[in-house]
Image (cartoon, grey):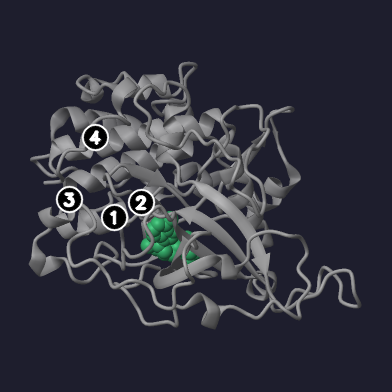
Amino acid sequence: KAMNGPTTRPTIAGKRSHSNSHTPQPKAGKSKDDFIWGDIIGEGSFSTVTLAWDKLPTSQPQSQPQPPLSSSPNRFISSIPSSTSSSSSISSHSIPPPKQSRIYAMKELSQAHIVKENKIKYVTIEKHALQLLNTDNSNGSSQLREHSHENIKHPNQRHPKRQKNEGSLGIIRLWMTFREGRSTYGGSDHLHNLAGDSLFFALEYAPNGELLSWIKKMGSFDEKSAKFYAAQTLSAIGFIHGRGVIHRDIKPENILLNSEMAIKVTDFGSAKILDQSTDAESNINEERSKSFVGTAEYVSPELLRDRSVGKECDFWALGCIIYQMITGKPPFKATNEYLTFQLIMKLEYSFPDNFPPVARDLVEKLLVLDPVDRLGSGEDGIEDIRNHAWFDDVDFQQIWNLDPPSIA
Ligand code: ATP
């Protein structure tokens, strides 16, 4: 979970790294020593996320990260009342060092922990899904290379003339992965002897934190902001589905915001990846789908009922998020998970009187118990949601080019 601002874990690459001099590595590639390490920015159940920068080849090794900037990391931060801006992931992290050096949110997963908790599939799916979504084309030939990012030309970059795959702009980018640790390869130890290993996912850093933090800070969003973020989320979901992936855990914690306050969907560990050649689920997902539960407040009724879901579950989650942005609270929330599930199964929620009527109509069409009747489930899929009257004044073609409204 997100940490409250910068912390004081040792941060110097040389000090934090295992010495590699006695440790044969599996392949030539990136290692921890290739990065300058900054603050921890968050922790999950199986991971720690730390800021890291490429060491510039030309620069002298830096013994210390640069001090944090005194100013906010972007112009929108200042719109948060200072009295409330000190206690969440929105607070500014160290934004230091070398100019031209790429910044990463480096997600470290302890392999021993993953194996012990039986989460290998979770990690594998996250990587696989991000690879599918991080390509320029839709035929699955990934340009993402383990241990290397040098030759990646990725669509996830702002470009005034870009036209294709704009939805990928809404997906967190995985720059590279690498593995590092104590195990030896090809010697007496075997590949499965990975007790000291960590897996690293070098993710694009989204400095403005989670959408959830913004909803909490602001209490709720005005309709304009809610619509903008709903439209970007919808666009990202459309792209994800188009690549044969169902996210299955869309929620405001998993929607991050970059420096321009555009969304970046993350956390694909619960995703379902359709086998594009056969249109059938791969085995890895079969097993995953049986064990998947998701996050109580955003779980679709079909998952609770049948324990299986299609793409419509992401539309249900979108309905929950629109409701939450406008009211400040998710539609279904009780004191415990069981009671929350009861509310969902009974579709028991209500709108406050001041809920905008057209937005209400959309939410009511998304929060439909039977996925077959849910908006977006028809032949035209996501187009039907885009065409809803609430989005009449949204230019989806430009949704990644527009300046986000200042959240109010
Ligand atoms: P869990 O695994 O328990 O569900 P999680 O999915 O939040 O938790 P991580 O993906 O490891 O776990 O993320 C931990 C925290 O780090 C997140 O809550 C988020 O605040 C922060 N974080 C993760 N990725 C990024 C990123 N790319 N940019 C900025 N912050 C990030």
Q: Secondary structure at mark 2?
A: strand
Q: Nearer the viewer, residue 213 or 24?
A: 24
- In 3D space, how far apart are the residues under numbered discs 2 and 4 (Cα atoms)? 14 Å
> Of the residues shown, which amino acid type is indicated by label 4?
Phe
Q: Counting residues from the N terminus, which is met first, the one under dot 1 or under dot 2? A: 1
Q: Nearer the viewer, residue 4 or 271?
A: 4
Which dot marks residue 228? 4
Residue 247 appears left or right of 64: right
Q: Is residue 274 above or below residue 205?
A: above
Residue wearing tag 2: 256
- In 3D space, how far apart are the residues under numbered discs 1 and 3 (Cα atoms)? 9 Å
Residue wearing tag 1: 208
Residue wearing tag 3: 76
> Of the residues shown, which amino acid type is indicated by label 3?
Phe
Residue 166, position as x, y percentages in the image: 42, 28
Closest to the camera, between mark 3 and mark 4, is 3
- In 3D space, how far apart are the residues under numbered discs 1 and 2 (Cα atoms)? 7 Å
> Of the residues shown, which amino acid type is indicated by label 2?
Leu
Residue 200, position as x, y percentages in the image: 59, 63
Q: Nearer the viewer, residue 119 or 175?
A: 175
Closest to the camera, between mark 1 and mark 2, is 1
Cβ(mark 2) to ligand 1 < 8 Å? Answer: yes
Q: Is residue 10 above or below residue 272?
A: below
Residue 175, position as x, y percentages in the image: 54, 49
Q: Residue at x 44, y 49 (%)?
A: 299
Report if the CB atoms under discs 1 and 3 are less than 8 Å apart: yes
Q: Secondary structure at mark 4?
A: helix
Q: Counting residues from the N terminus, which is met first, the one under dot 1 or under dot 3? A: 3
- In 3D space, how far apart are the residues under numbered discs 3 and 4 (Cα atoms)? 15 Å
Q: Counting residues from the N terminus, which is met first, the one under dot 2 or under dot 4? A: 4
Q: Counting residues from the N terminus, which is met first, the one under dot 2 or under dot 3? A: 3
